Amino acid sequence: GENVEQHPSTLSVQEGDSAVIKCTYSDSASNYFPWYKQELGKRPQLIIDIRSNVGEKKDQRIAVTLNKTAKHFSLHITETQPEDSAVYFCAASPPSGNTPLVFGKGTRLSVIA
Amino acid sequence: NAGVTQTPKFQVLKTGQSMTLQCAQDMNHNSMYWYRQDPGMGLRLIYYSASEGTTDKGEVPNGYNVSRLNKREFSLRLESAAPSQTSVYFCASSEQGGTGRSFGSGTRLTVV
């Protein structure tokens, strides 16, 4: 089955710098890659997602890139702010409509003011 | 539109007690899920229901049972709680497997 590896497990950046979180997946048939943000004590919330027919997607300060050949995808956050501090999870989904997402183990991002 | 609603938010159980965690969604989603979250372990899938009338095991199903009561509701039951089941439990729903999840606010369960 699908396996998702996420790196790094923790990341500290200065406010205003960029942050990059990387994930690799094992199933070349996977075609949906969402990213979730979980603030302390809160529920995970979908922040951006990408499908395999697209190489890059942007939404204001966040972007996701996908390299299908290498089977990896990345989350990029520019001009980081203290409110970006959270745990970020990547996930991958095989194409079967009934197969659940497989999550990475998460990255704890700290933005230092 | 409340999204995904979980009850209770907090629960303390003694070893061997049983309880049911309730989950309901009002988004007309087909698929529903139960996850547990432990420090450093991410979100691990316990059980899921791809559609009304079906349930399947996830990564960590031992010690749990589920019921998809109808399209809206998906409950998780601990028949005989163990300290290893101390965790935060999240219910989630989606239109289908390959789409984004909406998560409930979580249940913090402690088994002593």
Image (spheres, grey):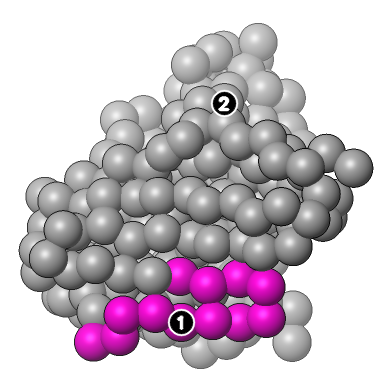
| Residue at position x 31%, y 69% in the image | A66
- Residue B40 shown left or right of residue A41 in the figure: left
How far is disc 1 from disc 2 in space, using C-alphas?
Answer: 30 Å
Where, by quadrant of the figure, is residue B103 drawn?
bottom right
The outermost residue toward the right is: A113
Q: Give A39 or B29, whichever is nearer the viewer.
A: A39
What is the number of the mark on residue A57?
1
Where, by quadrant of the figure, is residue A93 drawn?
bottom left
| Residue at position x 14%, y 51% in the image | A26
In the rendered image, residue B45, in percent from the top left (x then y), is placed at 37, 46
Magenta region, residue range? A53-64
- Residue B90 shown left or right of residue A31 in the figure: right
Q: Dot 1: what SS? A: strand
| Vertical placement of residue A103 versus A52, above or below | above
| Residue at position x 31%, y 35% in the image | B60
Chain of the residue that carries numbered disc 1 in the rendered image: A
| Vertical placement of residue A77 versus A58, above or below | above
Q: Give A105 or B46, whichever is nearer the viewer.
A: A105
Question: Three-letter amino acid code at disc 1?
Answer: Lys
- Residue B70 shown left or right of residue A28 in the figure: right
Quarter of the image containing the C terminus of chain B? top right
In the rendered image, residue B107, in percent from the top left (x then y), is placed at 67, 43
Residue neighbourhood size for the residue with mark 1, other residues' Cα within 10 Å, grouped as few (<14), some (14–19), many (≥20)? some
Where, by quadrant of the figure, is residue A10 drawn?
top right
| Residue at position x 57%, y 86% in the image | B27
- Residue B76 shown left or right of residue B65 in the figure: right
Tell me, yes or no, if residue B48 can be seen here.
no
Q: Which residue is mark 2?
A: B39
| Vertical placement of residue A108 versus B48, above or below | above
Question: Three-letter amino acid code at disc 2?
Answer: Pro
